[in-house]
Amino acid sequence: MPRRGERGRDFHHQAPPVPPARIGIRQAMTTDVNGVLRPSPFDPAGFRCRTLAEELADEWVEFVELSRLRVGTTRTYRQAIEDFCQFADGHLRDQAPAASMARPLPDLAALLTAWEGQLPSRFPLGSTRPAVQASGLRTLINRRGRHPDRPLDPGLAGLAAGQHALHWGSSRELDEFSRKDKAALVAAAWKDIGELGRRLSAGRALAAEGGHPAEHGWLSLPNLLWGLANDAVTPREISRNLPAPWPEELAALVTRETVPQANAMRRYFPILSLLEMLYPTQRDLHAFRVLLVAATGHAPEELTGLDEDDIEFVENGVRLTLTKHRARRIRRRAFTRIAATGTEEEVHTHTDRPRLEVAEILKRLLEVTAPLREKAEKHPAPLFMQASMSMKVWEVSARRFNPCGGPRQSFKGWLDKVGLDVEGRADVRRLRKSTKVEKAIAFGGRITDIADDHHEETFRSHYAQGTTLRVVSGKVITSAQQKWFAKATAGPVVLDDAAASSEGEALAGLGLTPEQAEDLRAGALDMGVTNCRDPFDSPFSERGQLCAVAPLRCLECRNAWILPSNLPQLLLFSDHLEAMRRRLSPVHFHTLWGQTAANLAAVLADRTEQEITTARAHIADGGASLQLPLAARAEFDA
């Protein structure tokens, strides 16, 4: 039954009837990434502890059907059962046939503990698989314990009800593509689509020139292409009627990268080359997927899951109905060149970027897959369709794009085909993360705007860990810290004789009011080591309160003004710091007095030898003294 708000769309497409399982084999029905029901069989007869395997399998089948688990999760539970039963066979030996969750002997609680204890040694360090398998098996045991008609040994029930002791590990998040790699991917995809269009146009033009091979000859390439394009002949008929070896002029047109020497395979691969001249293959569709992910920022499975009813071309763009099966959500998005106004509810408009027009990409895709969509058994037909040929029956079929597959047909195989070497793992999902990074920078880090197609927590856990965002965040934090640090540790203003004796207007140019300039010349602002512009506006105390650290921190304060008359006190303060340097460890001295000592050294370096000699003589005559708080006389190296 369709969920509320889905307008008749169903997440789970109906699959052909599944043949009944053999007696004893448990079979769970689960859905794949396309929403198609798939059987997942498990045979308890393959284990010596068959009773235990049957009990766990029954719980597994019910759990999968009630929870509507997907293929991957279903497989994980099945693997946990298989692994535990294999472990039981090896450790229980002759007692294995008697193993049952309903009996106290053999002791399955001790067996479960031993099995969980050896799991981490079989997986890479930090893997999540040990904890996932242990948790899955305990879930099935706990389900049995909650059923009133299924007995469960109390010892096993008590152990399974608790938490396992395995570390959950951590999954390695994919990092986004660099801007250079992303640009290269987009350029390579457009180039590959252009080559695909030329290849299909040439192949279909040749097919239009041909006729039935039985009437016009089996050695003519146009005739063979015509037969395949019009379903007049099958690949098996071509294989049977072509002489071996193939004529040189025909073999040169249908070469493969590698052709095995076995006779059947030598015929199979050249026929695949004929199909590639008429239809897009699995590897060809990676280019469209790259462009759509880069243009929309949506998950690859949402885009490859589109069908003919999910697209609606509108003025200057296209409207898509995107279904995310994992989140069980449907969204309608419009992608246009110009920001649309008055859009319907649930429709968000995104502005396309140069060379990434969603409408244009989809038009190219519809053009190349049109013959396959006509052959599709299901309607509305998927947009991403590929031609394939089974080696068992030698028949051409049009089926939905499979993003996985062999090495040659995978995304990595496509990268090798276009001659592109990207940094890091070859995974198209990294393009989605690249788009998220661009949005994060464009929106200034506002998660509510960035997480527009998933939960905000999903962005924090899966997308905010990318290298680019970490670097940007680090720069923002460093800039903020540097701003406040520079403000707090700004050194004093040093005045020479000319500036100190100038009129108030000259000092006003340095940031002093006429009243402050007059007080400065009169000595009313003297704090002992320096003068202070405003003792009640200290960066080290609350505003409005008298500075609590003067004169010890005056040389680190932006409010401090140093006059030539302060030189004797500065020299006395320098002697005090040298005494502290001798008494304190280097680390302790640098922590307490490092900035002050550096600023004082810079001030004294600007004074002439004559000025310092005169100031020393003034100190010797008793005309200057240093007034410091008592705490400054009692510092010890703690």
Image (spheres, rainbow, N blue to C red):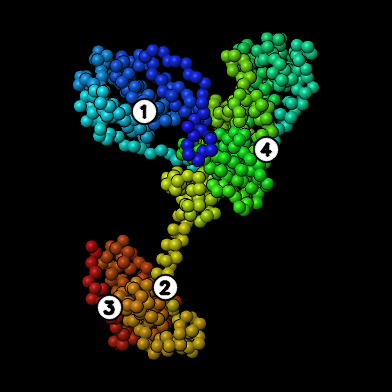
Disc 4 designates what residue?
Answer: 363
Above or below, 256 against 317 in this view is above
How far across and how far down the image is residue 613, in percent? 38, 82
Disc 2 designates what residue?
Answer: 491
Left or right, 586 with respect to 373, comes to left
**Identity of the residue drawn at 27% across and 27% down:** 147
What's the distance in space between the residues labelled 1 and 3, CA to CA?
A: 77 Å
Disc 1 designates what residue?
Answer: 63
Disc 3 designates what residue?
Answer: 628
| Residue at disc 1, secondary structure | helix
Task: Name the foreground residue: 524 vs 134.
Answer: 134
What's the distance in space between the residues labelled 4 and 2, CA to CA?
A: 65 Å
**Identity of the residue drawn at 49% across and 89% down:** 503
Q: Nearer the viewer, mark 3 or mark 4?
A: 4
How far across and how far down the image is residue 557, in percent? 38, 74
Left or right, 312 with respect to 157, comes to right
Task: Name the foreground residue: 195 vs 439.
Answer: 439
What's the distance in space between the residues labelled 4 and 1, CA to CA?
A: 43 Å
**Identity of the residue drawn at 39% across and 90% down:** 522
Kindly tell me whether residue 289 is visible in this rendering: no
Which kind of residue does numbered mark 1 sit on?
Phe
What's the distance in space between the residues labelled 2 and 3, CA to CA?
A: 20 Å
Kindly tell me whether residue 335 is visible in this rendering: yes
Q: Nearer the viewer, mark 1 or mark 3?
A: 1
Task: Name the foreground residue: 506 vs 495.
Answer: 506
How far across and how far down the image is residue 136, in percent? 34, 30
Of the numbered discs 2 and 1, the one sitting upstream in the chain is 1
Task: Name the foreground residue: 330 vs 409.
Answer: 330
